[in-house]
Each structure stands twice: as C-alpha cells, then as structure tokens.
C-alpha cells in the first residue's frame, strides 16, 4: 500500500492541514486584490437554528481571515420560496458577488432542490448544483462540495497516490457521501458505497484501505469493522452526553469510535479538530476558484 511508513499511526490534524490550505487561499486572494478584485461571498441564513448560526459565524470569521468580503442575508422562517428565489436571482446577476451560499436546513415550505438549482453554477461554492455534480461525475474541473473536497485533501496527506486502493464510503447523501465516492473514483480507488439498506456493512468496511464515515450515528464504527492499517476519515459530527466527571454536559464525537479503532489503523481524523475545519477552508478555496473563473484568470 502506498502509505508512507513514517505517517502511520498518526492523527490527521485538521488544524494543520486546513491551516496550510487557508494560507494558500489567502495568498491567492492577496494576488487578486492587487488587481482590484475583492472576492465576495453572499451567505443566506433563514430562521434561528442555533447550529446554522454557529456555522455562519465561523464562515464569516474565516472570510475575514483570508480577505473575502462576506455579505449576510438574514430572514425569518416565514420567508416565501418566491422571495428567496428572487434574491438568489439578483445575486446571480450581481457582478460584485462571486459566491452564493444558502445555509441548510431551510424551512420545509421551501424546496431545497429548487433553491440549489436557482444558484448560478459558477457561483455555487457549495458545489451542489446538478451541473457541478454532473461535471464531478465526468471528472471535469468544477466547484466540488466542501466536505468531500476537504476529506480528499486529508486522504492525500497520507496517501498521495490512491490508485488501486479499496475505499468504502458510509453514507450516500448528495452533500457528502455521493461526491466523496466520486472524488475517490476519480482518484482511481475501487469504491463501495454503503447506506442504511446495505446488508452486512462490516463485510465491506473490513476490506477498506480508506474508510470515510458520513452517517451521523455516534461511535458507529468499531475496531472489528476496520481493516488493519486503514486510513479513516470521520465526517460525522454528533453531540452526545459527556462522561460523568466532565465539566461540559455534552461533547462532540464522530461516527467512528476513535479510541476503539486507534491502535489498529494507520491514520485517523479526530472529531472535533478534523474534517469540520477542512469544510470551512474548502469553502474559502471554492470562493477563490469561483472568483478567478469569473474573471477568466
Ligand atoms: P444525511 O444526509 O442524513 O445522510 C446520512 C447517510 O447515512 C444516508 O445516506 C443514510 O442512508 C446513511 N445511514 C444512516 N443510518 C445508517 C446506518 N445505520 N447504516 C448505514 N448507513 C446509514 O447526512 P450527511 O449530511 O451526509 O451527514 C452525515 C454526517 O456528517 C452527520 O453527522 C453530519 O453532521 C456530518 N457532517 C459533517 C460535516 C463536516 O464538516 N465535518 C459536513 C456535513 C455533514 P440512506 O441514504 O439509506 O438513508
């Protein structure tokens, strides 16, 4: 397997890897500002979901750090679908806006798919538009979803060449699972995608040189589910009750039982401090890519 010996038994540190990407993006943005181009991201937030508010705040902070201007559009839960689509239409036309992000979830009376479809593919920094999904499937350069993009960078930090490796992706959402599988296929892995209807999941995960877990079930993957020396990317973010003596009442854990698998695997991402940090960094990266493409650079 093409995994460097010295990198085995290693935590894949989201702080370090996202820090390197953020530095690269900041440098790219600095170059653009020399040409009087100020990358601008429009962020649309609907309702008062506390998790969404935290995500949007973190994205704004990161924008400031790298030199991207962020413009926030906040609405109550009662915004009509028509109003949202009309805002997106005006943002699509606005030459001063380079990226558009609608923070999900949105209220059920607004169609998520219509909202995604309304965003111009060249401003679709979440990489969810069917045109970008189709391009990814055809291995054509495009804006790719941030979490799988970040996960792939983390995999490549351990295995630069993934050709011929067996990869298993747990989960098949449009946001994470499906684009993740596509990125791994494009990187010459042999990919198996498992989901809630899969029988005997362990028989697949135990063959995986690379295992990406994105299902949203705390500590789902145990040691006997993983192959020795596997690379584990834990996308899951789950809030659970803390142990009895802990000061905070709750804590975040992934979909993989970190302590249980740690000694068996080659490398693993922690939760928190892993993929989540890459997601925000890749959003900045996508905003830079989108801005450059819009200026034919
Ligand atoms: P999602 O849309 O709810 O999809 C979950 C997937 O897991 C579905 O494909 C589902 O299968 C599958 N699944 C559920 N229960 C299963 C089971 N018992 N066995 C096998 N597969 C099962 O979730 P998501 O948006 O992809 O997110 C997944 C996790 O990643 C969540 O914890 C989320 O918070 C986290 N996340 C983290 C980041 C980050 O930045 N780190 C970003 C996005 C999401 P079916 O399709 O058959 O229902």
Image (spheres, rainbow, N blue to C red):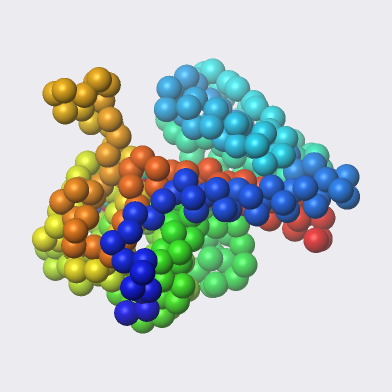
- Where in the figure is residue 158, as x and y percent of width and height? 41, 66
What residue is shown at x 60% (from left), y 70% (from top)? 140
Is residue 71 something one can see in this rendering? yes
Which quarter of the picture shows residue 168?
bottom left
Query: Which quadrant is home to the C terminus?
Result: bottom right
Residue 69 is situated, as x and y percent measured from the top left of the image, at 72, 35
* Above or below 248: residue 274: below
| Residue 124 visible in the shown view | no
Residue 267 location, quadrant: bottom left
- Residue drawn at x 20%, y 72% as measured from the top left: 207
Residue at point 72%, 51% (across, down): 27
Name the residue nearer the viewer: 121 or 78.
121
Image height check: is 122 above or below 2?
Answer: above
Q: Residue furthest right?
A: 35
Q: Residue shown at 19%/48% (left/top)?
A: 259
Tally of numbered tags: 0
Q: Position of residue 200 (x, y in %)?
A: 12, 63
Q: Nearer the viewer, residue 117 or 144?
A: 144
Residue 242 lies left or right of residue 96; in this view the side is left
- 109 is higher (above) or lower (below) than 201: above
Question: Considering depth in this image, is 53 or 34 the residue closer to the camera?
Answer: 34
Above or below: residue 36 compared with residue 252: below
Report the residue that reaches farthest toward the front. Answer: 6
Q: Quadrant of residue 2?
A: bottom left
Q: From the viewer's perspective, tell me whether residue 44 is left or right of residue 215.
A: right
49 sits left or right of 64 in the view:
left
Q: Quadrant of the N terminus?
A: bottom left
């Amino acid at each position: 397997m093409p995994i460097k010996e010295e990198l085995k038994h290693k935590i894949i540190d989201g702080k370090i890897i996202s820090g390197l990407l953020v530095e690269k993006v900041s440098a790219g943005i600095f170059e653009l500002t020399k040409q009087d181009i100020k990358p601008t991201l429009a962020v649309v937030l609907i309702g008062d979901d506390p998790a969404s508010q935290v995500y949007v705040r973190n994205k704004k902070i990161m924008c400031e750090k790298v030199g991207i201007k962020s413009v926030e559009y906040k609405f109550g839960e009662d915004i009509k679908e028509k109003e949202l689509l009309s805002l997106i239409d005006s943002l699509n036309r606005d030459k001063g806006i380079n990226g558009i992000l609608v923070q999900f979830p949105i209220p059920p009376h607004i169609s998520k798919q219509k909202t995604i479809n309304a965003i111009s593919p060249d401003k679709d920094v979440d990489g969810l538009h069917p045109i970008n999904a189709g391009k990814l499937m055809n291995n054509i350069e495009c804006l790719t979803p941030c979490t799988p993009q970040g996960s792939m960078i983390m995999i490549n930090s351990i295995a630069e060449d993934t050709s011929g490796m067996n990869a298993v992706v747990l989960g098949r959402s449009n946001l994470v699972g499906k684009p993740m599988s596509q990125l791994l296929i494009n990187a010459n892995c042999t990919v198996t995608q498992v989901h809630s209807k899969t029988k005997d999941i362990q028989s697949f995960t135990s063959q995986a040189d690379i295992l990406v877990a994105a299902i949203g079930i705390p500590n789902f993957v145990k040691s006997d589910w993983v192959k020795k020396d596997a690379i584990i990317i834990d996308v899951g973010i789950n809030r659970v009750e803390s142990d009895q003596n802990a000061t905070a009442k709750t804590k975040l854990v992934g979909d993989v039982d970190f302590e249980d698998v740690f000694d068996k695997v080659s490398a693993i991402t922690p939760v928190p401090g892993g993929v989540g940090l890459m997601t925000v960094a890749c959003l900045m990266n996508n905003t830079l890519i989108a801005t450059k493409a819009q200026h034919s650079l």
